[in-house]
Structure formats: structure tokens, C-alpha cells
Image: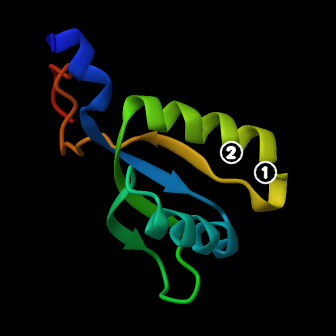
Amino acid sequence: MTEAQAAPSRKARYLIHAVDGAPVVDFLALAEIDPEITVVDVIGPHDAPHTVVVEISADKARVLELHFRSTGTPSHQLTIEPDQPLSLFDSTQTGPI
């Protein structure tokens, strides 16, 4: 298998977020039975989490994004984005703060 063929299966971290906890709880139920989704962390109150950190492939992230866009209503919609490392300072900043 070449590196290009292996790349789609490489997992990365993504954030899945909702304003309301209900869709996140529904997503967590799905994640429990989907072997392609690894839940790393759940953020928010136990009974109403608002964010889930997952490890998934880029292909799975695209599938989830399309699914979220096509099935969610404004009050019950999930969003997905790559989990970016936080930095205290912007690496392009050159002057004093």
C-alpha cells in the first residue's frame, strides 16, 4: 500500500459542536456504535455537553459534515472543524503586544 492510499485512513482530531446539548448527546450515541469514531473528550455539563473531541479520518469528517448540513435544523445542528492546537502567541506577530 502506498502512502497516498494509506492517507485517507489516518486519523486526526476534530471538534464537533452544538449550541444545545441534545444533538451532541445524539451524536455520542452514534459514536458508541461506529468503529470509525474515537471519542477523546466531551466538554460541557454532564447532562448537556456542547462539544466532543473525536479522532476520525478526513474522509469520515467530510461524510459527517455533509450529514450535519443536510439533516440539522438551526436549533439542532452540529458543526465539525479540525482541532487546532492553541498558542499563547501568534507566530506571525513581530511587535510587542
Label 2: which secondary element: helix
Amino acid at circle 1: Gly
Between 61 and 1, the one lying in front of the other is 1
Residue 4 vertical position relative to residue 23 in the rendered view, above or below: above
Between 91 and 21, the one lying in front of the other is 21
Residue 63 vertical position relative to residue 18 in the rendered view, above or below: above
- Hey, which quadrant is residue 82 in on the image? top left
Residue placed furthest toward the front: 1
Q: In the image, 54: left or right of 94?
A: right
Amino acid at circle 2: Phe
Q: Residue at x 20, y 23 (%)?
A: 93
Relative image position of residue 89 (x, y in whole percent) = 18, 37
Give the CA distance from mark 2 to mark 1.
Answer: 6 Å
Between 6 and 74, the one lying in front of the other is 6
Relative image position of residue 25 (x, y in whole percent) = 59, 74
Q: Residues within 10 Å of mark 2 (few under 14, many from 20)?
A: some
Q: Residue at x 40, y 71 (%)?
A: 42
- Residue that badge 1 annotates: 72
Between 85 and 2, the one lying in front of the other is 2
Q: How is the image coloured?
A: rainbow
- Residue that badge 2 annotates: 68
Q: Residue at x 58, y 64 (%)?
A: 27
Relative image position of residue 97 (x, y in whole percent) = 21, 36
Label 1: which secondary element: loop
Q: Quadrant of the N terminus?
A: top left
